[in-house]
Amino acid sequence: MATTEHAELTSNSYIQHHLQNLTLGKLPEGYERTDGSVLVDASWTIARDAQETAEMGFWALNVDTMGWSLFLGAIFCWVFRSVAKNGTPGVPSGMQNFVESIVEFVDGNVKDIFHGKNDLIAPLALSIFCWVVLMNTMDLVPVDWLPLLFQKITGNEHAFFRVVPTTDPNVTFGIALVVFILIIYYSVKVKGVGGFLGELTLQPFGKWMMPFNLLLEGVGLLAKPVSLALRLFGNLYAGELIFLLIAMLGLWQLPLHFVWAVFHILVVLLQAFIFMMLTIVYLSMAHESH
Amino acid sequence: MNFNATLIGQSIAFAIYLWFIMKYVWPFLSKMLEDRKAKIADGLAAAEKGQHELELAEQRSASIIKEGKEQAQALISNAQKRADEIVDESKDNARIEGERILTAARANVEQDIQQAREGLRNEVSTLALAGAEQVLMREVDASAHKDVLAKLSAQL
């Protein structure tokens, strides 16, 4: 659905525009903006292109990502909370059925993998699964609908607006970071600081190979959150990219979009499921001493 | 892939959602499912118990019916026996009564015969006397020949 009112719109700029976040950040004093204006003072503003986003550095916020992810997370919490509050142990119906089936599905997976006693893991798995599914599902909304709506509402037809939070690495790495902290927390809690450090340094080759062991185990440890985050990000980013390519095909996009969307439903659920399962596995490993 | 403060924001947001789910959602849902499981288990146990009781009741009712049938059978056979007895008894009674009546009738007849015989005897002796009187043309003293007459009549 390439917008045709801009004559200069190329497929390249169309895709790049779609992959740019709505970033709020601080630009330094004297910065010359894209439209030629020069900032008198350092000021907080919305980035107008990729270069400005880069200039804002780390202390900038992707407003669209934050907004959508918080909104979807709030929906998730609200739905589950209302069922938790109003549900009955009697015959369930409607939303309660739906929520219960998800809870039982997650609970079953947790019980299959994790055998210790931990009240955090099941809610963690549920939160990851539901939130990631919801964020991934935004990919099924045709790529131009929400950005166009946002551009109409704000009156800025160049406004960036990404609606799939999981195509922003900040989201996937943000969740993976929490998981990583929990892995370390439970490793230390269960095995003690010494036990955890010993696990990192004294195997697989014994204490005379300590630096090599540390390197090996350290990479292994860091690979857990990185692989979690990159797998989800990569799959959804690629999926969105293909939606964008399909969206530039004129009328052909209608059947193709349908086919890819149907296939993408699998990706949406599968990636959330994998993220959840690996989180359980990693935390279960953190509880076991080798 | 440009990282910025969104990373931190997302981590915090996730931690908050996680806390919320852990504190206010999961325990309730988990408890609800456990309660349901317990309820279903109770229901199944009660159903099994009911089934068992039904079986017992069926057995009991069958034995009661059997007993009743046996009693009825006993009653019927008793009644049969009694009826037979009554019939036999009345048959006996009837026979005895008949015999009694017959004996009485026979006695009557015997008596009548005896009387008739007696009468005839007297008549014969009277006739004999009269005949003898006629033959002898004189009066015979009946008392003088009483012994002879009695002997004669006894022979008749």
Image (tube, coloured by chain):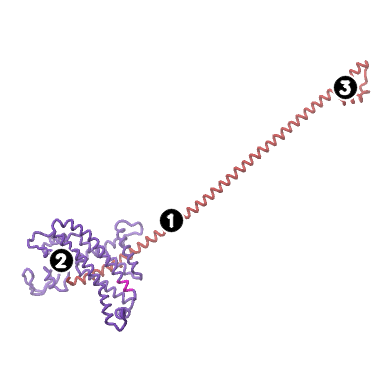
Chain colours: A purple, B red
The secondary structure type at the circle numbered 2 is: loop
Query: Can residue A89 be seen?
Result: yes
Instruction: Give the label on residue B125, or none.
Output: 3
Dot 1: element? helix
Residue B70 pos. (x, y %) = 57, 47
Q: CA distance from mark 2 to mark 3?
A: 173 Å
The magenta-colored residue range is A282-287
Q: Residue A97, how many percent across, how many down? A: 31, 58
The residue that label 1 is drawn on is: B47
**Residue under disc 1 on the same chain as residue under disc 2:** no
Q: Residue at x 17, y 56 (%)?
A: A254
Question: Does the segment drawn in magenta span residue A201?
Answer: no
Depth check, front residue: A203 or B150: A203
Q: Which residue is mark 2?
A: A19
Q: Is residue A190 left or right of residue B118?
A: left
Which amino acid, mark 3? Ser
Q: Regarding mark 3 in the picture, which secondary structure is present there?
A: helix
Image mark 2: chain: A
Specify the amino acid type for callout 1: Ala
Image spot of residue A113 (x, y percent): 33, 68
Q: Quadrant of residue A267?
A: bottom left
> Which residue: 87% across, 20% down?
B126
Dots 1 and 3 on the same chain: yes
Please, which chain is the residue tagged with disc 3 on? Answer: B
